[in-house]
Amino acid sequence: MSLHQEKVDRFSLPDKHGHFGPYGGIFVPETLMAPLYDLTEAYLDAREDAAFQSELSTQLKEFAGRPTELHLAERLTQRLGGAKVYLKREDTLHTGAHKINNVLGQVLLALRMGKKRVIAETGAGQHGIATAAACARFGLECVIYMGAEDMRRQSLNVYRMRLCGAEVRGVEAGQKTLKEAINEAMRDWVTNVRSTYYVLGSALGSHPYPMMVRDFHQVIGREVREQILKKEGRLPDEMVACVGGGSNAIGFFFEFLEDLDVQLVGIEAGGRGISCGNHAARFEGGKLGILQGCKTWILQDSEGQIELTHSVSAGLDYAAIGPEHAFYRDRGRIQFDFATDEEALEGFEALSQSEGIIPALESSHAIAYAIKRAPEMKSNQILCVNVSGRGDKDMQEAGRLRGDLPD
């Protein structure tokens, strides 16, 4: 862990061009420049509109089920020894994950902009089902793009999306995962930009998406601060979250960025191990580059070609990381580590058996870190883990990998 941390004014980022230092920005076809400027203007206006914020708060409470609990994992704490382990229970939200926070904000923005058709991409399916549910709630046409491999891994979520009235379009190109789904969603948006709103699901892509997604997920960290102060009378010593694009993590961390005594740790997907094509840990061999509208750390070869990625969790299987994470990593404010597929599966089982809480395989990467880290800490210290989603969607895949269910 780096000891040097630079304090940064979190509210000064991004700048008006969408930059987090050298990261972020707008790198899109000319046909999308005007729509992105319109979206930025509409969002900045909505952010200052008390009526919009009041409606979002109402929907988060009545439709999504906020606030979520901050749960002391007593049996897991006893099992591990060392620090008290608290769990932020985003898994209890409607549709099963943190994704609904951002989706409700963006769907309300789509309505504000007069859009009748919504598109989205999804990897693990949680963003897809959140978008489908919100579109059903507000009567909007919904199309979800999903890689064919992810559709195989997450067949339950595909059915849930279709049940809510969404059209799910499988993508057969490339690795048939999240990157290819984003490509197809962007092609759709370019073609139908006047009638269509694109609900991007993570804190990446072109400005203003990293800013918007972060802002809509800040509610996670705000609740944690209030809840931990009420329960313990102080802030956590360390906070950990899994990081794919980085939406759950930046929402969890943002409230604490200026509290330098709180260690912030993001866990990437170590896959089968850190070798080309076997993982999705961007800070383990990645390079600065541009992917799908954004300058950030990317897994790519010496010629700039995007490398193959792998993770047991469909939601972490992506070649780039959100630009704000790259910015804070440079400044030592957010540390990054990784967990392998095997470690994530062990975390998946450990939390289920210790607490009766079945985490998503994405969240299991953060649990895997906690299993290693908590015993290294003192009994009077606090380790807070963001359980970003529940594991219902992963039952078949985890069972298959463990040999408990047939292929």
Image: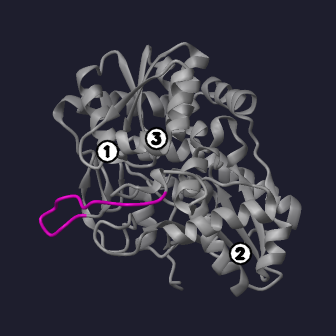
Q: Residue at x 46, y 41 (%)?
A: 201
Majority SS type along the magenta span: loop
Depth check, mark 3 against mark 1: the one in front is: 1
Q: Secondary structure at mark 1?
A: loop
Q: In the image shown, does 86 or 166 lie closer to the viewer?
A: 166
Q: Residue at x 38, y 45 (%)?
A: 149
**Amino acid type, callout 2:** Asp
Residue 386, quarter of the rendered image: bottom right
Circle 1/circle 2 CB separation < 8 Å? no
Q: Is residue 108 visible?
A: no
Q: Is residue 112 above or below residue 62?
A: above
Q: CA distance from mark 2 to mark 3?
A: 29 Å
Q: In the image shown, does 307 or 229 lie closer to the viewer?
A: 307
Q: Is residue 37 above or below residue 323?
A: above
**Amino acid type, callout 1:** Lys
Q: CA distance from mark 1 to mark 2?
A: 40 Å
Q: Position of residue 393 (x, y in %)?
A: 59, 44
In the image, 121: left or right of 256? left
Q: Is residue 302 magenta?
A: yes
Depth check, mark 2 against mark 3: the one in front is: 3
Q: Which mark is residue 201?
A: 3
Q: In the image shown, does 187 or 235 lie closer to the viewer?
A: 187
Q: Earlier in the sequence, mark 2 or mark 3?
A: 3
Tag 1 residue: 176
Callout 3 environment at 10 Å: few (<14), some (14 to 19), or many (20+)?
many
Q: Which mark is residue 126?
A: none
Give the magenta range.
Answer: 300-312
Q: Position of residue 340 (x, y in %)?
A: 49, 71
Tag 2 residue: 237
Q: Earlier in the sequence, mark 1 or mark 2?
A: 1
Callout 2 environment at 10 Å: few (<14), some (14 to 19), or many (20+)?
some
